[in-house]
Amino acid sequence: MARRLTLLVGSPRIAPGLLTRAAWQALEAAQVVLARDPAEPFADALVQAGLEVVAAADPSAPALARDLMDRAASGEVVWVASADGDPGLTDAVASEVSRLGDPPEVEVLVGSWDVPGSRLLDVVAVMDRLRSPGGCPWDAEQTHESLVKYLIEEAHEAAEAIASGDLDHIREELGDVLLQVAFQSRVAQDDPVAPFDIDDVAGVLVDKLVRRHPHVFADGGASTPGEVEVAWEQIKAQERAAKAQHGGGEAGHEGLLHGIPSSLPALLAAEKVVARWERSGRGPLPVGHGLGHELLALVARARTQGLDAEAELRGAVAALAATQPQID
């Protein structure tokens, strides 16, 4: 009879059906499967799959190690790792192995790994906790409208972080932008008329990305950035026409300002308008007289040179501030 202690570690974010074959073999062969708390995500997933998971009598590392080794002396035992990694347990098990004259075999078996994007599940779980009864009273009373200012603010802070080139700062500020998406999606779950959640948001996004990249996911022929932009606008126009046909509330044609938020900085809005004009194939951009038209012409000139007018102006202002003495 096998005498073995298996320390099974894995991701609490992975469904039990995605455990490795070796992990399932160890679990099915075990005389007993133990965990510090069978209600923890990893252990609970095994319980939901039909396995019996026994709670450890004494979860302290030394006592737990001795209990596990005593059980393994007469059969196969699996310990399901806790979310915190069971600090001190492997050292305590090593001490037990040294103490015993004929110790059972001990192995650490990795049953699953986090896939890319797994921590997003934690974001959803934390946001749900904050909005649910017993969570945060401030988070619970927020609405789509009350959160708009934070969405705008965090987007601007992320843009500033990117301009700084500080990768730690960029990572933090992108997290704040992600929070706003998760927050708005969780608020939408409580809508009494037409609720949706973050999976619906992600689903719409994935469908849109696939639909607008036929050169990647289908048989589209765009092979340069310019061709991709032209195809993108054509696909968007088709989408608008389809929405209008089904009562979606959007016009079937595209004006130069269509879909451009009125709150967008003027230089960014001008660049979008110039880009649309160029893609329309209408010829040179007509420019009138006056300062506003001159600024528009500068935006068009920047685009022909592959420059971002907004970034260029910000850079010039920053350079001026850096070279001038402090002004009282």
Image (cartoon, helix red, strand yellow):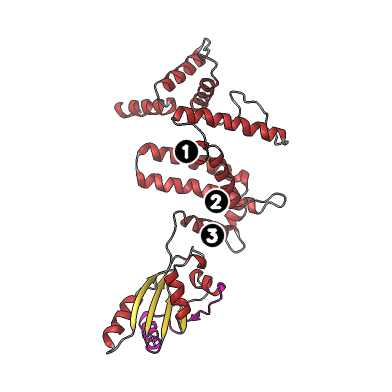
Marks 2 and 3, how far apart at CA? 10 Å
Residue under circle 1? 156
- Is 32 located above or below residue 115 in the figure? below
Q: Earlier in the sequence, mark 2 or mark 3?
A: 3
Q: Specify the label residue 182 is tagged with.
A: 2
x, y percentage for residue 314? 40, 28
Q: Amino acid at mark 2?
A: Ala
Q: Which residues are magenta?
A: 48-74
Nearest the eye: 14 or 61:
14
Residue under circle 3? 125
- The residue at 41%/83% (across/down) is 76
Tell me the quarter of the image containing the N terminus: bottom left
- Circle 3 residues within 10 Å: few <14, some 14–19, many ≥20: few
- The residue at 55%/51% (across/down) is 182
x, y percentage for residue 59? 42, 80
- Is 259 located above or below residue 19 in the figure? above
- The residue at 51%/65% (across/down) is 15
Q: Any magenta on residue 66?
A: yes
Q: In the picture provided, is 253 more to the left or to the right than 273? A: right
Q: In the picture provided, is 253 more to the left or to the right than 57? A: right
x, y percentage for residue 269? 52, 26
Marks 1 and 2, how far apart at CA? 18 Å
Q: Amino acid at mark 3?
A: Ala
Q: Specify the label residue 191 is tagged with.
A: none
Name the mark nearer the viewer: 3 or 1.
Answer: 3
Tell me the quarter of the image containing the C terminus: top left
Nearest the eye: 170 or 117:
117
Q: Is residue 183 visible?
A: yes
Q: In the picture provided, is 302 more to the left or to the right than 92? A: right
